[in-house]
Amino acid sequence: MGSLLRSEEMSLCQLFLQSEASYLCVAELGELGLVQFRDLNPDVNAFQRKFVLEVRRCDEMERKLRVLEKEIKKDEIPMSDMGDVPEAPLPRMMIELETTFEKLENELKEVNANAEALKKTYLELTELKHILQKTQQFFDEQSSDKGVRRFSEVQYFNTAMNSYLSAEGAPERFTTDLGFLAGVILRERIPAFERMLWRVCLGNVFLRQAEIEKPLEDPVTGDNVYKSVFIIFFQGEQLKSRVKKICEGFRATLYPCPDTAADRREMIAGVVSRIEELSTVLKQTNEHRHRVLVAAAKHIKDWIIKVKKIKAIYLTLNMFNLDLTRKCLIAECWCPVDDLERIHMALRRGTERSGSSVPSILNRMDTKETPPTFNRTNKFTQGFQNIVDAYGVAAYREVNPAPFSIISFPFLFAVMFGDAGHGLLMFLFALWMCLKEQSIAVQAKGNEIFKTFFGGRYLILLMGLFSIYTGFIYNDIFSKSLNIFGSSWKATTLPKTGLYPENMMLDPLTQYSDKPYWFGIDPVWQVSGNKILYLNSYKMKLSILLGVMQMLFGLVLGYYNHRYFGNRINIVCEFVPQVIFMLSIFGYLDLLILAKWVTIDAKDSSCAPSILITLINMFLYKYPDSPCSALPMYWGQQFIQTVLLILTLLCIPWMLCIKPYFLKKQNDLRMLSSMHSSNGENHNAYNADGEVAVTMESSGAAAEGEGGGHGHDGPFDLGDTIIHQVIHTIEACLGSISHTASYLRLWALSLAHAQLSEVLWSMVLNKGLTIAGKFPGGIIMYLAFGFWAILTVSVLLLMEGLSAFLHALRLHWVEFQSKFYSGSGYIFAPFSFETILNNEGDEVSS
């Protein structure tokens, strides 16, 4: 509990490393993850540091590995893990890794270039094959419908062109041979291509096109594209030049096409033969590329880890100073005091691995700097610590709220979320994540929302468990109650008709047994008309009791803070009056609530005093004889309340004036002491209150550091001290009132959750249960249950659960932690390979 209650004791150390052993010593410290290095070269540019060349080499290796990893993922090749995380390689292994990566990159570049060239040639041959086939179809269409005679190809297209132009209204007719160009173009560009040909060539061309049914692979991007074959007939060189320019503009590819059918058939045979040969070569090239990537995929994860570790080591070494005279590197680092022996052993291992005969030296330093905050956590406590750190990191050695939040946070959540059925669903979901955490952890990296749920799996587990408990306390399970132990209310005898009336009044004097319901709320309240009135009173008072207890506990933790840091002024001038102020008002209110619960029963309920009116009359100092709600609850109530009211009023000037007075006196004594010390005199000899002076000096620095006056190490300023104390007093007095009222959210959200669950039952599931008819009723019940289950999970579990979580978060951050927690520290961020690899892995997956 000691390490959980406060952060670890830290020490600033100076580290002397021999140049030949520095790399392996830092590697051992990175595996240990318990040392936070300080940058001793903050003003030096990153490109001017000693190991910048090694860092750039690591960057280049990371670039090559990223390219290789991208190709492996492109081919969907699984990357296997080698098991244990590899250690940081030796410095001389960088050359071997660079050689391996260079060889792989060059081989992959060569294979990709050859494959791209082969694919480009394959695409061209495929397009040429389609052109020859489609062109042959165009030429075969010259035969007449009757098939009596065949014209020559040129005569056919002369006739076709003349008839085409005559239909368009052109007076000129062709009497000479026509030329043509054939090619392929993207299918979506055909309409624009045709319009451009018509406008530029003034309608003096004839275009035929046909779609290529199968998609073709782009050799550069690898995407499938759809193209069409076209053939353009024209007359003259001028139109030929225009057609070529238009084809270039639309990125259409032109191919040679013979004039005669025999030449076309011969070319098709040659093209098909070349395509078959090219397919074989391309298949072999892809197989070779696949073999290279499969071999690389077996080691790429280990390579990535090794390179990241090397880079992290050299980046850390760049933070050190180089002592040329001693030929060693000097570093400064924060270390946990309890782990100094482990750090010494890690340095010894690194020195032995390097073969150096000179040991590394670790010296503790004296410093006035505030150390970082380091709270040891495990997978169970990490989620609760993250909640606390999200508000602010604790000051060094300040009380850590996380161990107390392990119980208080899920319990306050459950008070607002009190339904045993919903809590059971939440508990089972969290239990599944806890039991399958190893397999789920890998899947959670790619989903930020699910990663958040997975990180808080133990928190959700406790929230569900406590919700089951409070659900049984409220006797609320999916908005229904269980009559396990038998109701303590006894109804009257059955009337002669055999049925109870729809509305009947149960008299607690005659129809309630002496034995209360054994556990939780009596189930009769579920069917009572005044259920909300009863539960409102119960939950509202329960919220006040829980809130005052938690705030008083926060003040007690504040006392432990003051005592640990030796702040006697804060104990006398802050803790004591705050506790008196809280107990005089809200502690007394809690006693009245408990006393009314215990002492007043059904016999006295007709004239039971009101706690709210009693508290209001206490501050107004009014004690009327009537009505019943204003009557005293016990003998001597006026005297007790008068004393409490006087104590409450005295606490305000107590908090406001006494602390600035003591701080001013302490500062005057310090100044006189420094003046006499400069004159060579004993400063304790002149002071009749010397003992008081020494006592105040022992707590002065800490008192100023925690808001003792001016909040910094500069000269004492009485005005700033008074202003600070006024603000603190107002915050303490008004905050205790507003924070107590804020705990009423426990009652409000519990009521809202219960009513929403009841509405969902009565408006959805109950309707499905009461549908008449067997067959249609079963279908409607099936649909109603599905709709009810979806709304239960989405609204009551997710939305209401998130709302209760946020309100519990606010109660801990503001109402509880403000009583003792400053949150002004900074987190301990050690040099750790595990942290580096996990963080970079999350960035890649996201």
Image (cartoon, rainbow, N blue to C red):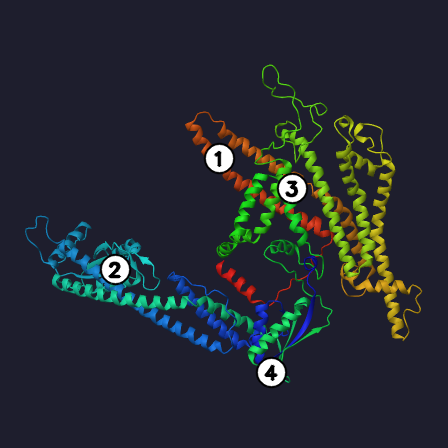
Residue type of the residue flagged with mark 4 = Ser
Residue at figure coordinates x 50%, y 54% from the top left? 440
* Precedes in sequence: disc 4 or disc 1: 4
Image quarter hosting the N terminus? bottom right
Q: CA distance from mark 4 to mark 2?
A: 75 Å
Q: Secondary structure at mark 4?
A: loop
Q: Badges 3 and 2: C-beta atoms under 8 Å apart? A: no
Q: Badges 4 and 1: C-beta atoms under 8 Å apart? A: no
Seen from the viewer's position, the closer of residues 155 and 825 is: 825
* Precedes in sequence: disc 3 or disc 2: 2
* Precedes in sequence: disc 3 or disc 4: 4
Q: What residue sits right under mark 3 in the picture?
A: 415
Answer few, some or many: residues within 10 Å of disc 4's Cα (few below 14, many 20 plus, some between 14 and 19): few
Q: CA distance from mark 3 to mark 4?
A: 64 Å
Residue 154: horizontal and vertical position, in percent?
12, 59
Seen from the viewer's position, the closer of residues 193 and 487 is: 487
Residue 200 found in image quarter: bottom left
Q: CA distance from mark 3 to mark 1?
A: 27 Å
**636 vs 323: above or below:** above
Q: What residue sits right under mark 1 in the picture?
A: 785
Q: What residue sits right under mark 4 in the picture?
A: 357
Q: What residue sits right under mark 2 in the picture?
A: 184
Q: Secondary structure at mark 2?
A: strand
- Image-based side of 625 in relation to 768, left or right: right
